[in-house]
Image (cartoon, rainbow, N blue to C red):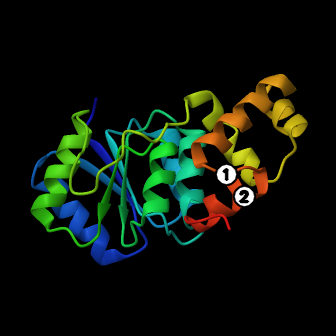
Amino acid sequence: MANTFIVADDHPICSSMITLAIRSRWDDAEIKTVTSLGALLGLLDDECTKLLILDLNLDDSSGLRTLAMVRGHHPDVPVLVFSANANDELIRGARALGADGILSKELTREDLALAIQTISEGRGLAQPIDMRDDVPRIPAGPLRVLPLLLEGLSNQGIADKLGLTQDTIKKHVATVLKALGVKSRGQAIIKLQSGGNPE
């Protein structure tokens, strides 16, 4: 796989720090930066990505919704969430959505470089923020319903868009709700949009 990294962050200083961290491990890396979810999804459609380093708050999207949209469209891309606010709810939600790790923006460049190398090599990241193995990850099939769920489509509407049966969509939605620790579609949408507690 090519050493193509995507940095999705709307803060130029953070993007520069991440770029320097990547370059400290891969001097031949191709690094693409974006500041919006729309640009990110377009880039992911066109690139074979070694690792996506993702700030959840971009120009046009915020909270776990950002990760849900990425995972819904590209469930196989390795994702490292880089956050200033890694609370328990965010960590649980990011884990359920399949993030490979979550890092605090307070890390040193060297610690960031080590974490990026660890994740990009397919090894688990235990530090600096534990990804809690007890939180179930949403499988690829149910992840596909997330963008459509966030659009507010009914089960039948999602089934029509994905070419699946309504029963399959019901099972996928139930899997998503359980993994996110919520009881309703509305709570799931609120949690994904806020990145926190759905109450």
Q: Quadrant of residue 102?
A: bottom left
| Residue nearer the viewer, 187 or 81 | 187
Q: Secondary structure at mark 1?
A: loop
CB under 8 Å between discs 2 and 1: yes
Residue type, label 2: Gln
Q: Quadrant of residue 16?
A: bottom left
Callout 1: 10 Å neighbours few (<14), some, many (20+)?
some
Residue 157, how many percent across, how many down?
88, 39
| Residue nearer the viewer, 11 or 134 | 134
Residue identified by numbered label 1: 182
Relative vertical location of residue 9 with respect to residue 161 in this rendering, above or below: below
Residue type, label 1: Val
Quadrant location of the C terminus in the rendered image: bottom right
Q: How many marks?
A: 2
Kindly identify the residue that appears in the image at 75 percent across and 47 percent down. Answer: 149
Residue 62, how many percent across, how many down?
56, 67
Relative to 22, is 54 on the left or the right? right
| Residue nearer the viewer, 29 or 37 | 37
Relative vertical location of residue 141 with respect to residue 4 in this rendering, above or below: above
As drawn, the label of residue 187 is 2
Residue 83, how many percent across, how many down?
37, 66
Q: Secondary structure at mark 2?
A: helix
Residue 115, how many percent across, how many down?
20, 51
